[in-house]
Image: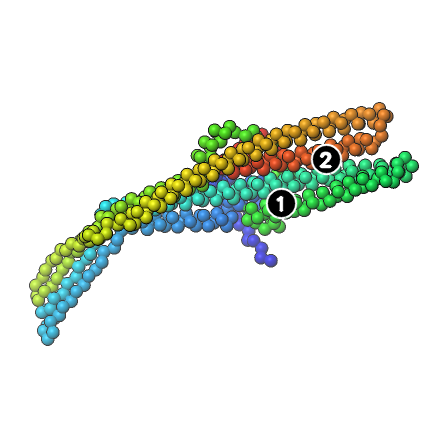
Amino acid sequence: MRRAPNIRLIGLCLALLPGGTVLCGAETAWPPAKWDAGHLVQAAVAGHPDLAVARAQVQAAVAARQTAGEKINPALNVSTAPVAGEKLKEGTYGFGMDFTLELGGKRKTRLSVAERQFLAAQAHLAEVEWTVRTGVRQSLGAAGTAAERVRRQRTALATQQEVVDGMEKQRQAGQLGGPALVPARLLLQQQKLALATAQGQLAQARVSVATAVGRPAADLAKLDLEAAGLSQPPAPPAAERARELALSHRADLKAATAEAGVAEAAVLAEVAKRHPDLHVIPGYEFDGGGHKVTLGFSLPLPLFSKNDGPIAEAEAKRVEAVAKLRAAETRALAGLDAALAEWQSAREKLETTRSIGVAQDKQLADAEALHKAGETDILSVLTARLERDTAAVSELDALAEVQAAWLKAEEALQTELSAPGKP
C-alpha cells in the first residue's frame, strides 16, 4: 500500500472563504498528531484534487493574460534578383521589415477579455474552495452525529438490559410469567441491532470525512468525533436578508457574472477586428550598384467582410451568458427558499421532540420518587428511564435534521452562520 507522503507546511496562510475565515499558521508539522476540525479544513484546502485543478486554471488564466498583452513580431522579407552571366553587383538585392500596427484597440480588448477570464477563474476557485470546505463541515457534522448516536444507543441498550435482568429475577421468584419476558427480550435484540447499525454508520461517516478531506481514512484514526458533535443551530435569518447574502456572497454567481463580463468583452474584441491592421514596411534595396531606401504600406480592404458573422456570434454568446447568470440567480434563490423552509420545519420538529423529552424526564423523576417512597418497584423506574433514553435518541435525530438544514442553508448562502454553541 502506498503511503501518503508527509508534508511540512511552512508559513501556511490559506484563505478558506472569499472574504471569510482565514487559517494561518507558523510552522506546522503534517500530518498532525491529533486531528481537529481546523486541521481537516486546512488539509482539504491545501491538498484537495479539485482545488488543485481550480488553482491550475487560475495559473492558466494568468498566462493567458500575459499572452494577450504581447505585441506582434515584425516579419523580415529578403529578395534577390541576380543577372545571369553578370557580376553580382549588377543584380538587385533587398530586404524589408514588416511591422504590424493593430488598429481599433485590438490589443486593449484582448487584454480586457483575458482579465475577465482571470476574474472568472478566481471566482471558480472560490466556488470550489467553498464546496470543499462545506463538504468537510457536512461530513464532520454527520460523523459527530453518528458518534453521539452510538453513545446514546449504548445507554438505551444498557437500560433495556437492566429491564430484562430485573424481569428475569421476578420470573425466577415466581412473580412474573415467562411469556411476559418475550416483548422485553425482543426489544433488547432490537436495541442491539440499532447499536450495530449506528456503529456501522459511524464507520462509514469516518470514511466520508476522509473522502471530503482528500486523505486516507487511516490518517484520521485519532479524529475526536465527540468534539465534532452537534452545535445548536442559530435561528434562520430573515428571508430578505438571506436573499441579499445569497446574491452578494455566492461564488457561483460571481463566476457567472465574470463569464458574462468575458462575453461582453469578447463582443468588443470582435467589433475591434472590423478595423484592419496597418502594415508598415520600411526596407533597403541595392539595385545595380545603386542604393535605395523604400517605405511601403499594406492595409486590408474590408470590401467583402466586415467581421459581421463573428460579431453576431459573440453577441449571441453574450446574451447566453446573461441568461445563464439570471438562471443561476433564480436557482440560487429557489434553493435558498427551500433550505430556509426546511430549516424552519426542522426547528419546529426539534421543539416538539424536546417537549416530549421534558415530559419523559418528569415521568422518570416521578417514577424515581415513587420508588424511593416504596410505592413502586425498580422495573417502573427502569422502564421510565428506557423511555427517556429512547426519547434522547429521537431528539438527536431531530437535532441532526436541523443541523443538516442549517448547513444546506449555509450552502445556499455560501456564508457561515454562527452558532451559539453545543446543545
Residue 113 seen by the camera: no
Where disc 1 sits, the SS reads helix
Q: Residue furthest bottom?
A: 85
**Neighbour class for label 1 at 10 Å: few (<14), some, many (≥20)?**
many
- Hey, what amino acid is under mark 2? Thr
What residue is shown at x 41% (from left), y 42% (from top)?
A: 324
Q: Residue furthest right?
A: 174
Q: Position of residue 34 (x, y in %)?
A: 61, 44
- Label 1, label 2: how many angstroms apart (C-alpha)? 22 Å
Q: Is residue 172 above or below residue 291?
A: above
Q: Position of residue 133 (x, y in %)?
A: 52, 42
Colour pattern: rainbow
Q: Which residue is mark 2?
A: 390
Residue 53 seen by the camera: yes
What residue is shown at x 86% (from left), y 40% (from top)?
A: 179
Instruction: Name the mark on residue 114.
Output: none
Quadrant of the drawing holding the N terminus: bottom right
Mark 1 vs mark 2: which is more N-terminal? Answer: 1
Q: Is residue 46 above or below residue 79?
A: above
Quadrant of the drawing holding the C terminus: top right
**Neighbour class for label 2 at 10 Å: few (<14), some, many (≥20)?**
many
Instruction: Name the mark on residue 205.
Output: 1
What residue is shown at x 57% (from left), y 48% (from top)?
A: 211
- Hey, what amino acid is under mark 1? Ala
Q: Is residue 91 above or below residue 57?
A: below
Residue 259 location, quadrant = top left
- Front disc: 1 or 2: 2
Where disc 2 sits, the SS reads helix
